[in-house]
Image: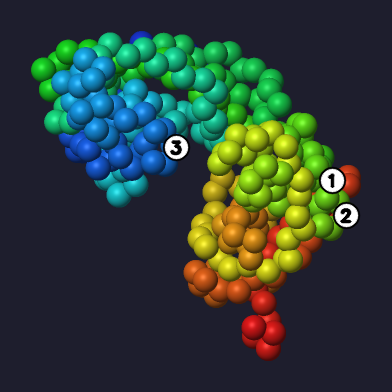
Amino acid sequence: MTSYEDRLAAFVGKVLVPGRVAPDPVNRPMIRHWAEAMGDGNPVYVSDEAARATGREGVVAPATMMQAWTMRGYAAPVADGPFDELVALLAEGGYTSVVATDSDLRLVRELVPGDRVSVEEVVESISPEKSTALGTGRFVTTVKTYRDADGEVVATQQWRTLRFRPAPRQEPRPRPALNPDNSFWFEAARDRRLVVQRCAGCGTLRHPPGPCCPECRSFDWDTVEAAGRGTLYSYVVAHHPRHPAFEYPLLIALVELGEETRLITNLVGVTADEVTIGMALELDWHEAGDGLVLPVFRPVPAKER
């Protein structure tokens, strides 16, 4: 019987994705949506005039969109193939969780509206089992080659993911990454105060915290304490991947505070089928252990609305 290691090794050099063609050609609306979502104001992505001023023939797509054009959509039929076979084999070994670790994208030429991109993905290597902070796993490195409709290479991408068995955590919840820009916010939360950073130059409120005002570029700031009332701007119901510190389904909310800033938090005291966009919310607090206190929001009782 072939060993598990040999079965994994047999995938090295194998084509996982054999020239999948993008469902849509490169197009201006998607370029514009991407630039807006990323906050990228480079005019060569939206203006022919600006692009021509740089020597280009017209607008171009951001290089960071390369992978997005060929990604398999949520509604796309899932066909059994080498990629799914590798995922199943890794899951057989207990490596059921995944996280992207790095990407090295090399652009040969910029994409322009009308280009139809395809991608071929080949396994470059599968590492021996490694111990990481996330858990025991294997690094899977693949190389994606992107081509235009004429078969010419437009980009290559070395893509590495970690497939791992989640390590049990001793802490009730993952710890936040504290730094000089955000520690004040968590310190205030520990005292059960929800604060919003305010520019001392122009008075603009901002969240999440940052060192510089996006409006006037001032580095001087103070805080105001939020009243603790808001409305539900948007939300998602998370089912997977599951983490032992949370109860599922997990309601993740984007709350619009009365102070006209938005906060990503959890909804409590309500079920997924009871949630409605625009519902009135009030502040509550969750003790996550070891001095970590986090703001959560719950619906305002009907009699108090």
The image position of residue 146, as x and y in percent, is 26, 19
* In the image: residue 162, left or right of residue 285: left
The quarter in which the C terminus is drawn is bottom right
**Amino acid type, label 2:** Asp
Q: Is residue 246 left or right of residue 152?
A: right
**Residue 110 image offset from top left, x and y in percent:** 26, 19
Residue that numbered label 1 is attached to: 187
Residue 71, percent from left and from top: 32, 34
Disc 1 is placed on an element classified as helix
Q: Amino acid at mark 3?
A: Gly
Is residue 80 something one can see in this rendering?
Answer: no
For the point 84% across and 46% down, the residue is 187
CA gap between label 1 and label 2 equals 7 Å
Q: Please report whichever mark, 3 or 2, sits nearer to the chain's N-terminal start.
A: 3
Please tell me whether residue 125 is drawn above or below residue 27 in the rendered image: above
Q: Position of residue 123 (x, y in %)?
A: 39, 15
Mark 1 residue type: Glu
Q: Which residue appears at 32% of the width and 30% of the height?
A: 43
| Residue at screen point 44% across, 15% down | 104
Label 1, residues with CA under 10 Å away: few <14, some 14-19, many ≥20: some
Dot 2: element = loop
Q: Which residue is mark 2?
A: 191
Judged from this view, the residue extending furthest toward the bottom is 303
CB atoms of marks 1 and 2 within 8 Å: yes
Residue on which disc 3 sits: 39
- Relative to residue 105, is residue 131 drawn left or right? right
Whether residue 206 is situated above or below residue 277 in the rendered picture: above
